[in-house]
Image (cartoon, rainbow, N blue to C red):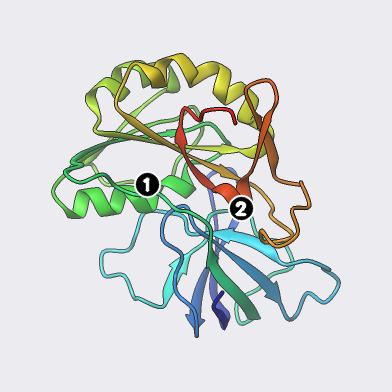
């Protein structure tokens, strides 16, 4: 595990009013889409565990290698200039199959921020992107087609890869909604996100979710990005 430091450069708000931070890192790498960092804010001494942070938002036109925008939320007390202790990146992120040129993104949470770095990769390669969501989304390039989740069935048959995001507590509903569709279409991957207080070192079970009737996965350790559908073990 890499250990480094960071500093908050700016704070932004999403369309829902959730806060996200632009962070500059030193000694560790910007997390690839779907991977995560564990972060202690040195000004937030009252928090006993590290905060789990993912990269979020559509990439800047001229990205800087040591800077990234987080997916929301971040604590209300975090402010520009705060110094951070950073561990990671950790976990299994999204992987683009060779030849991927058409990407469908599907957000089953309250925002699509976790998925937008992938959109930047595909558009930079001259590909096409469709986003399916029923929630507010930030300003996006005209090259991203926006659809409601009701249009997902059509979008997945068009795509080479369908990349989804869902909070761990909503995974069961996501599985019921998409399981059959995923078996009848192209490659699917799903980011199961949340708070990972043990950072895959203690199997604390906070991020556990069930596959099938008996089998469980730990998002922090086994993912947080999974091929979908998963097979019970």
Residue at 69 percent across and 55 percent down: it is 196
Q: Residue tagged by mark 2? A: 221
**Label 1 environment density (alpha carbons within 10 Å; few <14, some 14–19, many ≥20):** few
Residue 18 visible somewhere in the drawing: no
Task: Tell me which residue sits at (58%, 43%) in the image.
Answer: 16
Question: Can you see residue 44?
Answer: yes
Q: Which of these two is toward me, 41 or 201?
A: 201
Where residue 132 appears, as percent x and y from the top left, is 39, 29
Q: Are marks 1 and 2 in contact (CB under 8 Å)?
A: no
User: Which residue is the extreme one toward the right?
Assistant: 46
- Position of residue 46 relative to residue 162, above or below, is below
Q: Secondary structure at mark 2?
A: helix
Q: Quadrant of the N terminus?
A: bottom right
Residue behind mark 1:
139
Where residue 175 sits in the image (x, y, percent)? 56, 23
Q: Residue at x 30, y 17 (%)?
A: 154
Task: Give the percent coordinates (x, y) of residue 17.
Answer: 61, 48
Outermost residue toward the front? 233
The quarter of the picture where the C terminus appears is top right
Is residue 58 found left or right of 197 in the rendered image? left
**Separation of marks 1 and 2 at Cα, in angstroms:** 33 Å
Q: Secondary structure at mark 1?
A: loop
Observer-nearest residue: 200 or 13?
A: 200
Report the front residue among 8 and 218. Answer: 218
């Amino acid at each position: 595990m890499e250990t480094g430091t960071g500093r908050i450069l700016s704070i932004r708000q999403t369309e829902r009013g959730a806060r996200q931070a632009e962070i500059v890192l030193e000694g560790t790498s910007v997390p690839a889409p779907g991977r995560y960092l564990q972060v202690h804010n040195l000004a937030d001494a009252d928090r006993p565990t590290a905060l789990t942070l993912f990269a979020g938002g559509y990439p800047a036109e001229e990205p800087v290698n040591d800077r990234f925008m987080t997916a929301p939320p971040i604590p209300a007390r975090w402010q520009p200039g705060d110094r951070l202790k950073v561990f990671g990146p950790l976990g299994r992120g999204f992987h683009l199959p060779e030849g991927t040129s058409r990407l469908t993104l599907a957000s089953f949470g309250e925002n699509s921020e976790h998925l937008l770095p992938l959109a930047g990769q595909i558009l930079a390669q001259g590909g096409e992107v469709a986003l399916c969501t029923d929630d507010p989304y930030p300003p996006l390039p005209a090259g991203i087609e926006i659809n409601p989740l009701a249009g997902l069935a059509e979008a997945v048959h068009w795509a080479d890869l369908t990349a989804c995001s869902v909070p761990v507590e909503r995974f069961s509903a996501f599985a019921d909604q998409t399981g059959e569709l995923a078996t009848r279409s192209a490659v699917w991957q799903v980011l199961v996100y949340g708070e990972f207080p043990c950072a895959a070192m203690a199997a604390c079970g906070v991020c556990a979710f069930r596959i099938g009737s008996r089998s469980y996965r730990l998002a922090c350790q086994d993912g947080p990005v999974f091929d979908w559908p998963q097979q019970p073990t």
